[in-house]
């Protein structure tokens, strides 16, 4: 016999179903409190992103059947649909590739146990103080049977994981310092040794979550209401808007592409398109190899002088800093001291010719998935720029990708680095460097200050490029060090 739901229980169930949708106004909140005697959480964020109006994000998933299908598959596999996926939904082709790769790294057969995988995700995200990703993987870690004691701090985790701390630190902030000796320490640690296959899995996870932290901060991803830091029980501040208005993006925020802004910035896109056209026309005049090398070194040096928000010291909370060692270590230290970043020539060690096969050999199928994801982000185009159609954006995409690699000391012999200064202005470079090197310092003002006439979907695409270029740069240094150890 089926259990009948009592009227009061039914009301309470319906109440929780409704509050989870975040569409409760203050009047309803007061009534609910009175009737049920429960405190109602109020979302701290206005939708999945602090930078992008919620309506724009929701419209994408409603209109695009493919996006809807990917969302449904993700929900079925994970039991949730996180805000990162919702924002990536602007680009369903990429989102599908991203989710397949992440699912394989975290859930499918592989060298590392499930709880180790989530703990490594926590370590990597904590390095950039990304509480959003840390909290996500703390929950997953516990769900797959991880020992809660490990969450008290890295020093409570097994020695084997603690030894990964140095690799995590260097990869996140100064990957050019990684040597075969670092790899040897991990592979020859007696009873705490890593196997080569385990280490490859760990390296891919570390680079995945360092770069995903960049995307999280770069898109202003907000915490879901049911997670730590995603809600409050305080009453809303006095204003003409109720909570359900704010949750639906009807507050005082102004779209960064408002008509006044477009009037003031008239021509920004056209100027960029004209520069692309001029560079394409000058393509025949090839510079000498010496001149190309000089231009790279000049751009690399200039990229070191681009200032991030270093004055705003980001001191990690105890909740975050306990998951990693040496909190003072970061990219900022290197730029202050003006250390020389050695040049890494892609012709000597590339993803296509070396890294891909090493990953695929030691962790089958992952090399293929990563390659597809890199290619997807790099080649993705709708042939548009703001309101202009039928535009070839390949030159711009290549400049962005190569600028990030240049900041990490990686040089492509066949690329003219003089193009970067023509196509990327200073505000854009500041945004790129902050998001890639010190993502926790990324601000809404930085996001709004570059490409002000462009659509939010185009800025999200830029962030996908930045994320994947950063991940590949870290991977190249790690895989080169592993290769040197093996030979």
Image (cartoon, helix red, strand yellow):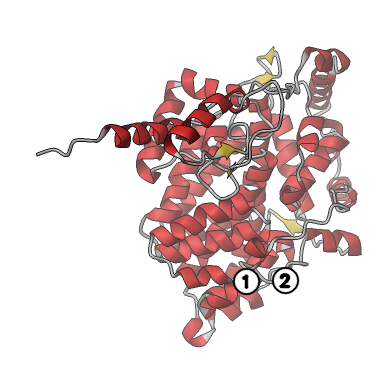
Q: Residue at x 72, y 60 (%)?
A: 316
> Could you tell which of marks 1 and 2 lies nearer the N-terminus?
1
**In the drawing, what numbered circle is on residue 326?**
2
**In the drawing, what numbered circle is on residue 349?**
none
Give the alpha-carbon distance from disc 1 to disc 2, as whole Å.
Answer: 9 Å
Question: Which residue is more in the foreground, 276 or 451?
Answer: 451
- Compared across the picture, whether 426 is left or right of 180 comes to right
Q: Residues within 10 Å of mark 2 (few under 14, many from 20)?
A: few
Across and down, in percent, residue 346 comes to 69, 53
**Which of the 4 image quadrants contains residue 478?**
bottom right
The quarter of the rendered structure image containing the N terminus is top left
Inspect this view and state whether residue 360 appears: no
The quarter of the rendered structure image containing the C terminus is bottom right
- Compared across the picture, whether 26 is left or right of 70 comes to right
Q: Name the residue furthest front.
A: 34
Across and down, in percent, residue 68 comes to 43, 27
Across and down, in percent, residue 374 comes to 57, 43
Dot 1 falls on a residue whose secondary structure is: helix
Mark 1 highlights which residue?
Answer: 165
Asked if 435 appears above or below 341 in the picture, the reply is: above
Dot 1 and dot 2 residues touching (CB under 8 Å): yes
């Amino acid at each position: 016999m089926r259990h009948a739901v009592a009227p009061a229980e039914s009301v309470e169930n319906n109440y929780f179903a409704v509050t989870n949708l975040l569409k409760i106004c203050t009047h309803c909140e007061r009534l609910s409190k009175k009737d049920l005697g429960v405190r109602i959480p109020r979302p701290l964020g206005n939708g999945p992103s602090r930078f992008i109006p919620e309506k724009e994000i929701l419209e994408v998933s409603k209109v695009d059947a493919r996006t809807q299908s990917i969302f449904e598959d993700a929900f079925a596999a994970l039991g949730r649909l996180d805000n990162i996926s919702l924002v990536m939904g602007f680009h369903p082709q990429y989102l599908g590739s991203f989710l397949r790769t992440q699912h394989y790294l975290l859930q499918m057969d592989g060298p590392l146990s499930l709880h180790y995988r989530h703990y490594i995700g926590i370590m990597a995200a904590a390095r950039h103080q990304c509480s959003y990703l840390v909290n996500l993987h703390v929950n997953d870690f516990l769900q797959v049977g991880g020992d809660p004691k490990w969450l008290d701090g890295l020093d409570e985790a097994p020695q084997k994981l603690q030894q990964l701390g140095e690799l995590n630190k260097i990869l996140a902030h100064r990957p050019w310092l990684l040597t075969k000796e670092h790899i040897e320490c991990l592979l020859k640690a007696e009873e705490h040794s890593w196997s080569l296959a385990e280490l490859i899995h760990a390296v891919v996870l570390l680079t995945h979550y360092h770069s995903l932290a960049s995307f999280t901060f770069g898109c202003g991803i907000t915490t879901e209401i049911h997670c730590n830091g995603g809600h409050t029980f305080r009453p809303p501040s006095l204003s003409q808007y109720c909570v359900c208005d704010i949750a639906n993006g009807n507050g005082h925020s102004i779209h960064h592409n408002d008509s006044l802004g477009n009037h003031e910035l008239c021509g920004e896109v056209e100027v960029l398109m004209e520069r692309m056209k001029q560079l394409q026309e000058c393509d025949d005049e090839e510079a000498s190899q010496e001149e190309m090398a000089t231009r790279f070194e000049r751009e690399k040096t200039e990229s070191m002088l681009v200032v991030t928000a270093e004055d705003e010291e980001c001191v990690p909370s105890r909740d975050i800093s306990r998951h990693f060692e040496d909190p003072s270590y970061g990219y900022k230290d290197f730029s202050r001291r003006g250390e020389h970043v050695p040049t890494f020539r892609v012709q000597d060690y590339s993803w296509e010719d070396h890294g891909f096969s090493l990953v695929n050999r030691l962790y089958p199928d992952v090399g293929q998935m990563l390659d597809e994801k890199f290619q997807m982000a790099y080649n993705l185009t709708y042939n548009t720029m703001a309101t202009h159609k039928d535009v070839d954006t390949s030159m711009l995409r290549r400049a962005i990708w190569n600028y990030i690699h240049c900041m990490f000391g990686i040089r492509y012999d066949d690329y003219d680095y003089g193009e970067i200064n023509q196509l990327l202005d200073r505000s854009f470079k500041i945004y790129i460097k902050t998001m890639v090197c010190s993502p926790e310092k990324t601000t809404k003002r930085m996001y709004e200050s570059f490409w002000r006439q462009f659509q939010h979907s185009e800025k999200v695409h830029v962030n996908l490029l930045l994320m994947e270029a950063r991940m590949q740069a870290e991977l190249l240094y790690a895989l080169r060090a592993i290769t040197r150890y093996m030979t």
